[in-house]
């Protein structure tokens, strides 16, 4: 639901009634993950997607029905071996869809959704927890959880249920993840189970590009396309200009290592070092390799890479830290132009985030979608200080 928050927030402000269909569970090769949503208003306007086209028509009708009768429903769609042309997922997956009406007559529920959509549309951190499996009278009940653990709304049922659900939602929000949690209907860890879908809305992850060169301009465009908040940093003010990087969110004229020491990064941040100049790279990477960021890549030839690693070792960087450095940066696509190189770098970032191998899917017997992506944050946490 929160993946289309900006559009839905406008609908709320305009006073529209609408129904939202949200993917709450998937199995097999499902095209969309939990949290993906399609919404339909009372005029029949639709936004979003739950399946990339496989079952959109059927889900659209479910939304129209929910708007009419005000009933929340849970529906499963899957591939049919008997009739591949029937409503289902021809890719072979299974998805569970929760369809929730959001009508002006239901002021309490609409208030919770309105606040969640408003916060998400403004880029504020929040988590929306909804019951997706459990007692029929609780299905679709919602709780809006703030970063400090406070919450709005209610799930009904046992008084402890809201408190326990808020704790589970806050844990997922802290990690910046959308996922499910199973708790007891009375708020305990045992007893009759119910399932929550927790959608986390967090500010976009950061991409910091060091080196205001032509390759950086192409990488900025790709980074924005992937949803990153992109910063360009270069020590040379003549190159770090708005005219050269129109799509960047921030342009910083400062020594790279000093800027990195002064700014906030987290486990979703990616650092792309494109300067391939030792006087900038070495102090920058010496610091970067101590930080729990998602990805660190550095541009340069293999000779530059070897010289850079030698200098980093001389500066005291240990081998486990050097192993985190992606250098030369990017996947082997045979890239030559700045745009092709930016695509190569972006492909490596996505593969690293999602646990992909980077090999061609043609002829490979590997999963198309990876359910358990690698995370470098855990690696760094286990290693402690690495420089």
Image (cartoon, helix red, strand yellow):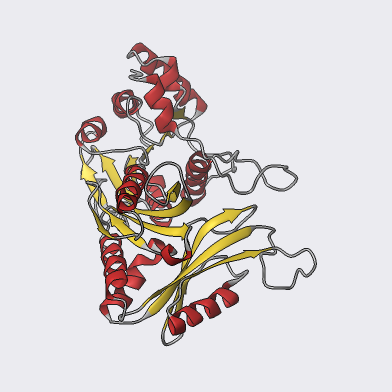
The one of 132 and 219 positioned closer to us in this rendering: 132
Q: Position of residue 376 (x, y in %)?
A: 44, 32
Q: Residue at x 32, y 14 (%)?
A: 315
Which residue in the rendered view is the most extreme toward the right? 82
| Quadrant (top left/top right/bottom left/bottom right) for the N terminus | bottom left
Q: Residue at x 40, y 62 (%)?
A: 3
Asked whether the viewer can see residue 35, the reply is: no
Asked whether the viewer can see residue 166, the reply is: yes
Q: Position of residue 353 (x, y in %)?
A: 48, 41
In the image, residue 216 sits, relative to residue 93, either above or below, namely above
In the image, residue 45 sits, relative to residue 24, either above or below, namely below
Q: Position of residue 350 (x, y in %)?
A: 50, 45
| Quadrant (top left/top right/bottom left/bottom right) for the C terminus | top left
In the image, residue 285 sits, relative to residue 237, either above or below, namely above
In the image, residue 295 sits, relative to residue 195, either above or below, namely above
Q: Residue at x 66, y 64 (%)?
A: 89
**Which quadrant of the figure has residue 188?**
top left
Horizontal arrangement in the rendering, residue 266 relative to residue 334 (left or right)? left
The one of 166 and 286 positioned closer to us in this rendering: 166
Horizontal arrangement in the rendering, residue 201 relative to residue 29 (left or right)? left
């Amino acid at each position: 639901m929160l993946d289309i928050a900006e559009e839905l927030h406008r609908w709320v402000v305009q006073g529209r009634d609408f129904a939202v269909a949200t993917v709450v569970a998937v199995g097999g090769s499902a095209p969309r993950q939990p949290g993906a949503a399609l919404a339909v208003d009372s005029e029949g306007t639709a936004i979003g997607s739950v399946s990339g086209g496989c079952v959109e028509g059927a889900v659209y009708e479910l939304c129209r029905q929910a708007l009419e009768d005000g009933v929340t429903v849970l529906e499963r769609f899957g591939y049919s071996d008997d009739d591949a042309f029937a409503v289902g997922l021809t890719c072979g997956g299974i998805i569970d869809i929760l369809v929730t009406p959001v009508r002006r007559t239901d002021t309490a529920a609409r208030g919770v959704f309105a606040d969640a959509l408003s916060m998400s549309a403004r880029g504020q951190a929040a988590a929306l927890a909804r019951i997706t499996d459990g007692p029929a009278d609780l299905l679709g009940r919602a709780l809006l959880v703030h970063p400090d653990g406070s919450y709005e709304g209610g799930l009904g049922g046992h008084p402890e249920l809201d408190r326990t659900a808020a704790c589970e939602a806050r844990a997922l929000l802290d990690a910046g993840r959308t996922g499910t949690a199973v708790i007891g209907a009375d708020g305990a860890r045992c007893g009759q189970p119910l399932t929550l879908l927790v959608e986390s809305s967090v500010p976009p992850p950061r991409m910091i590009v060091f080196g205001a060169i032509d390759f950086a301009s192409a990488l900025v465009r790709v980074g924005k396309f992937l949803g990153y908040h992109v910063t360009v940093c270069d020590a040379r003010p003549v190159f770090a200009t708005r005219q050269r990087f129109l799509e960047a969110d921030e342009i910083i004229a400062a020594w790279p290592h000093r800027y990195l020491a002064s700014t906030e990064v987290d486990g979703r941040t990616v650092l792309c070092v494109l300067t391939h100049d030792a006087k900038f790279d070495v102090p920058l990477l010496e610091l970067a390799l101590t930080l729990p960021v998602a990805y660190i890549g550095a541009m340069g030839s293999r000779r530059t890479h070897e010289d850079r690693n030698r200098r980093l070792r001389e500066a005291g960087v240990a081998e486990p830290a050097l192993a985190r450095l992606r250098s030369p940066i990017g996947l082997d696509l045979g890239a030559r132009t700045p745009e092709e190189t930016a695509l190569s770098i972006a492909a490596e970032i996505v593969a690293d985030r999602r646990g992909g191998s980077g090999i061609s899917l043609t002829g490979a017997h590997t999963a198309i979608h990876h359910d358990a992506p690698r995370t470098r944050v855990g690696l760094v946490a286990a290693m402690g200080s690495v420089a």
